[in-house]
Image (spheres, rainbow, N blue to C red):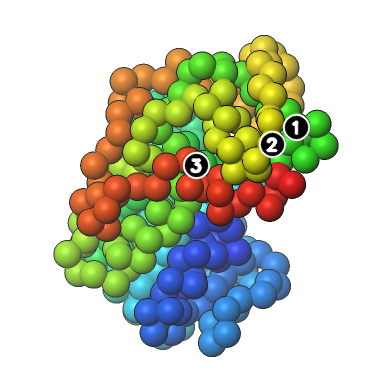
């Protein structure tokens, strides 16, 4: 049995589906009750309280660990999740980390994630670490403005990074959970090309078959908007990357190709598959 945390999100949902389709027994973990594919067991658990994972981990051979905001919840002890997994007999953990632990290692988020990576390496378990950069699905931030005004509003319109399709992250995660050859692997996951916000707006217009106007926000305007849904420190951190990506953040990684035997999907492919969110 394989346990998938964050099972209802942009990565966990396709990962759960892929594992179930491969004939694996899967336990999907999310904070709240949710619909899951037929044959998949669902367990509601809060990752900020690792003891609550014990029922989900019983009998599991592998764990996909996606923490998101749980990494920084008050009193969070993410290292205890790895200890709980080992105590439950889990043999393999695939951790969703972030490219920032390599490119910008000194922010509080990356320091915490790097510590968790180190805990996993030292756990005695089999492991693989996935480090994606920006997600194509972050374009969903624009869904309402595209639906209502046919506008994408974003800062740094002509500064791009190689955003990755979450479905590709899910496929890489499935391979790491199922294939022994990925034990000890550390994979940097990016899309196939650098793409700017203005170019993403053009791709959305192509998927919709109707014009989408691009409106460039100032950094302050973007920070105000982003701070409504994330801590101000994280908003500033994100804007630093979006506005001045380092050479390492601009690099197109070969790792998706290495793991999957195919190139990562371009942003236009993600836009076409998710166009309903923008109509």
Q: Write down the quadrant of residue 9 in the picture.
A: bottom right
Closer to the eye: label 2 or 3: 2
Q: Which residue is mark 3?
A: 268
Residue labelled with disc 2: 210
Q: CA distance from mark 2 to mark 1?
A: 9 Å
Mark 1 or mark 3, which is nearer the start of the sequence?
A: 1
Secondary structure found at label 2 = loop
| Rendering coords of residue 211 (x, y %) | 69, 31
Local packing at callout 2 (Cα closer than 10 Å; few below 14, some 14-19, many 20+) is few
Residue with the most extreme front position: 209
Residue visible at 64% across and 49% down in the picture: 275
Helix, strand or loop at mark 1: loop
Upstream in the sequence, badge 2 or badge 3? 2
Comparing 195 with 38, the one in front is 195
* Residue 135 % position (x, y): 50, 41
Q: CA distance from mark 3 to mark 1?
A: 17 Å
**Are the two marked residues, 2 and 3, in contact with CB atoms closer than 8 angstroms?**
no
Q: Is residue 44 above or below residue 198?
A: below
Residue at point 23%, 56% (across, down): 261
Residue 169 locus on image (x, y percent): 41, 53
Distance, label 2 to label 3, CA atoms, is 15 Å
What residue lies at 31% left-to-right and 20% top-to-bottom? 247
Relative vertical location of residue 251 with respect to residue 26 in this rendering, above or below: above
Residue placed at 39% from the left, 28% from the top? 194
**Left or right of residue 224: residue 108:** left
Q: Earlier in the sequence, mark 2 or mark 1?
A: 1
Dot 3 crowding, Cα within 10 Å, few <14, some 14–19, many 20+: many
Give the percent coordinates (x, y) of residue 279: 74, 47
Q: Which residue is mark 1?
A: 150
Is mark 2 in CB contact (under 8 Å) with mark 1?
A: yes
Q: Is residue 116 visible?
A: no
**Going by the picture, which residue comes out furthest to the left?**
181
């Amino acid at each position: 049995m394989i346990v998938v945390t964050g099972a209802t999100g942009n990565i966990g949902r396709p990962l759960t589906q892929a594992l179930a389709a491969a004939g694996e027994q899967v336990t999907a973990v999310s904070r709240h009750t949710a619909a899951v594919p037929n044959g998949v067991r669902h367990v509601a658990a809060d990752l900020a309280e690792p003891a609550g994972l014990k029922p989900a981990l019983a009998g599991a051979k592998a764990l996909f660990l996606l923490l998101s905001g749980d990494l920084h919840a008050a009193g969070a002890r993410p290292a205890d999740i790895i200890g709980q997994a080992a105590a439950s007999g889990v043999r393999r953990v695939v951790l969703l980390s972030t490219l920032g632990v390599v490119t910008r290692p000194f922010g509080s988020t990356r320091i915490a994630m790097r510590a968790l990576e180190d805990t996993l390496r030292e756990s005695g378990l089999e492991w693989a670490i996935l480090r994606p950069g920006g997600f194509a699905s972050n374009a969903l931030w624009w869904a309402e403005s595209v639906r209502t005004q046919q506008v994408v509003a974003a800062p740094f319109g002509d500064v791009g990074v190689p955003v990755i399709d979450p479905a590709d992250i899910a496929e890489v995660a499935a391979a790491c959970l199922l294939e022994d050859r990925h034990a000890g692997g550390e994979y940097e996951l990016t899309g196939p090309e650098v793409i700017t916000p203005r170019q993403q707006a053009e791709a959305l217009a192509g998927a919709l078959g109707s014009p989408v106007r691009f409106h460039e926000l100032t950094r302050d305007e973007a920070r105000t908007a982003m701070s409504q849904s994330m801590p101000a420190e994280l908003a500033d951190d994100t804007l630093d990357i979006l506005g001045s990506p380092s050479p390492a953040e601009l690099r197109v990684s070969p790792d998706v190709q290495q793991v999957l035997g195919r190139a990562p999907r371009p942003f236009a492919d993600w836009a076409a598959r998710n166009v309903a969110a923008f109509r």
